[in-house]
Amino acid sequence: MIVAMCLAGLPGIALAQRAIETTRQFTVSGAVEKSITITIADIKQHKAVALGDVVIKNHKGEEKKVAHGVQGVLLTELLADVKIKVDKPKQYSELVVLLTASDGYKNVYSWNELFNTEVGKHVYIITEMDGKTIDNMPDAIIAVSTCDINAGARYFKGLQQIAIKRVE
């Protein structure tokens, strides 16, 4: 059963990566006034939202697993206090948020997608899944967009860095 509002009636989430090195923190850098490091302890300071069971499918729409009892913190909450270097509001439209995993895998969102569309209300850092907390999850730190239709690229494991970049 998929509980997240944006997934109702949609095929689900796809699996994108194999087992990789677990991470305990990630950095946020790039077009920011000051780079920061967000640790598991920092993530746990935020209120987690219950997402229920989430079906994880690959890029072909084939079910790979059902993640039970998923909870997460919105990525936008974790990025809310990051001071972005922009001279005028229109420049937010030029920003991308590039996630990089411990194995070098990359994933991208636009700034507007995260902060000005429904998608941003459904991009989570997973804090609990299959009875394990973020402290004990073998693939942590995990990010997922529960609003994507068939997005193997956005079930993201081993988050190591987020770079805010201006598109030229």
Image: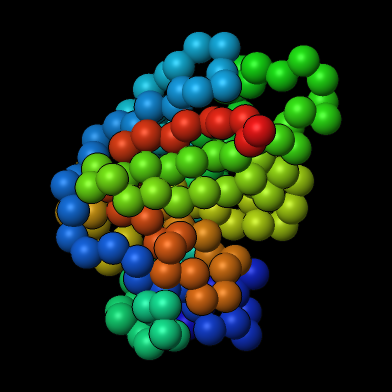
- Say if residue 114 shows up in the picture: yes
Q: Residue furthest front?
A: 168
Residue at 35%, 66% (x, y): give it.
16
61 above or below 129?
A: below
Residue 69 can be seen in this image: no
Residue 132 vertical placement versus 48 (above, below): below
| Rendered view: 45 above or below 16 | above
Expressed as whole percent of the image width and height from the top left, the position of residue 105 reads: 32, 51
Coordinates of residue 78 in the picture (x, y in percent): 52, 33
Could you tell me which quadrant the C terminus lies in? top right
Residue 84 in picture, x, y percent from top left: 63, 21
Q: Residue at 50%, 12% (x, y): give it.
A: 34
Q: Nearer the viewer, residue 79 or 137?
A: 79
The mark total stands at: 0
Report the side of 29 relative to 64 (left or right). right
**Residue 134 placement, left or right of 84:** left
Residue 80, horizontal then vertical, whole percent: 61, 29
Q: Quadrant of residue 162?
A: top left
Which residue is at 57% across, 75% downward? 149
71 vs 6, left or right, is: left
| Residue sitting at x 43%, y 43% | 99
Vertical order, 24 against 36 (above or below)? below
Protein image colouring: rainbow
Between 68 and 26, the one nearer to me in the picture: 26
